[in-house]
Image (spheres, rainbow, N blue to C red):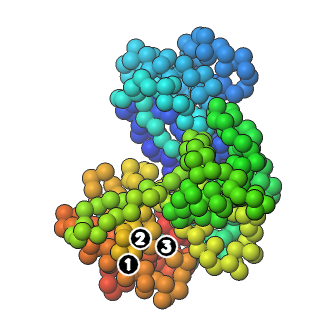
Amino acid sequence: MSAYRERIAEHVIRDSLSTFGAVVIEGARAVGKTTLGRQVTASSVRLDSSPQLAELAEVSPEAVLRGPPPRLVDEWQLAPSLWNAVRHEVDERGTPGQFVLTGSATPADDVTRHSGAGRFRRVTLRPMALAESGESTATVSLRALLDGEKVAGVGGPTVPELVGSMVRGGWPALVTQPTRSAAQYLGAYLDDIARVDLPGADLKVDPARMRELIRALARNVSTEAKATLLARESGLDGNGPAVSAQSVRRYLDALTRVFVVEPQPAWTPHLRSSVRLRVTPKWHFTDPSLACAALGASDEALLTDPETLGLLFESMCVRDLRVYGQVLDASVCHYRDDAGLEVDAIVELRDGRWAAFEIKLGGERAIDRAAGNLRQLARKVAPTRSAQLCSLAVLTGGALSYTRSDGVNVVALGHLGP
């Protein structure tokens, strides 16, 4: 068995167990939910270990909930009635830290329609960020950036090494066992999404059409591609769209339900001017390696295709910002307005403090342009939001982190940590 690598979300879960009766760990298949759940619980039961166990959980939930707390109930959605059973048990016991539930799909709304307010805390576990896989030096803290501190750092992974990490992804099985073939592992993963994962979550899709949509989505990762564009690009043999725009929306919702796709919402601050904001989300897979696998992109191919590499690098940066921001209870959005200004990522805390990030692989001119965009955004927001601005930063694939004379931070992704 591979050694456990500490996950940043573990801190969020342990803290939540001191307040809530139950914590629900959600996330894509194979991101390490069960392994993490076992780290924070005293007993466990896996409902996917046998059909009979899932049936028992439906007819006699108290049987599977019995055990020293916190008790892990793995793949709880296989017995949806457990939601209310856990809710009632939490109320009956009256103390926090009773259960941890894990699942790879968000159940239908009717399953969790009874309020879990004050009882349940949902925590999303994503594939490993570079600091978790040991590939970032973690010398530049996202928390410190949001505290307005200057940055400094040297070294870390090279661009080819970052590309290798991107193609492999943050999947624990591939991180901890590097002799495995990432191409074969992720190819099988993509095949199983339409053939196993979605049907297992009671989501009806056509496997062939879903595979074509996934390829179209991979070609448009880190963009605001509309359903009509994705429908056109998922055409089979040039004979028109394999998936209608209406089906695209339904399929995207299905992929979101199983945590394969995670849209990046638009940020909507108050502005000084009357410029209209765009509200379309950007599309990201939960890990950029899925886009690489869908495109059949190798390390070598990406290093000769700077446009595709730039979009995938942006997606990797967003993944890491989400992982690091989770322990701060931060959201990660993007900004775009009708005047043509775009900023790749906005990290915002619940108290309103925020930091803006432009993402560039490197190059002095590209960094200068990115810094200009960030300063322009800072001038556009209303005074109340300007007062809450903590940091302007350019995330790069370089080996240096520093604060420029204009106050904009340049941060190497290979230096970033929570």
411 to the left or right of 129: left
Disc 2 secondary structure class: strand
Res 291 visible: no
Residue sitting nearer the eye, 46 or 249: 249
Q: Which mark is residue 373?
A: 1
Res 300 visible: yes
Residue sitting nearer the eye, 225 or 238: 238
Residue 74: x %, y % from top left: 61, 30
Dot 3 alpha-carbon crowd within 10 angstroms: few under 14, some 14 to 19, many 20 or more: many
Among numbered discs 3 and 1, the one appearing first in the sequence: 3
Using the image, determine if residue 137 lies above or below residue 45.
Answer: below
Asked if labels 3 and 2 touch by Cβ distance under 8 angstroms, the answer is no
Residue 332 quadrant: bottom left
Residue 21: x %, y % from top left: 42, 26
Q: Nearer the viewer, mark 3 or mark 1?
A: 1
Dot 1 alpha-carbon crowd within 10 angstroms: few under 14, some 14 to 19, many 20 or more: some
Q: Name the amino acid type tagged 2.
A: Val
Residue 75 quadrant: top right
Dot 2 alpha-carbon crowd within 10 angstroms: few under 14, some 14 to 19, many 20 or more: many
Q: Which mark is residue 71?
A: none
Q: Residue furthest front?
A: 239
- Determine the CA span between mark 3 and mark 1: 11 Å
Residue sitting nearer the eye, 63 or 51: 51
Which residue is at a point 31% across and 66% down the rendered structure image?
276
- Determine the CA span between mark 2 and mark 3: 8 Å
Using the image, determine if residue 196 lies above or below residue 78.
Answer: below
Asked if labels 2 and 1 touch by Cβ distance under 8 angstroms, the answer is yes
Using the image, determine if residue 131 lies above or below residue 102.
Answer: below
Q: Which residue is mark 2?
A: 343
Which residue is at a point 75% across and 75% down the rendered structure image?
300
Q: Which residue is mark 3?
A: 359
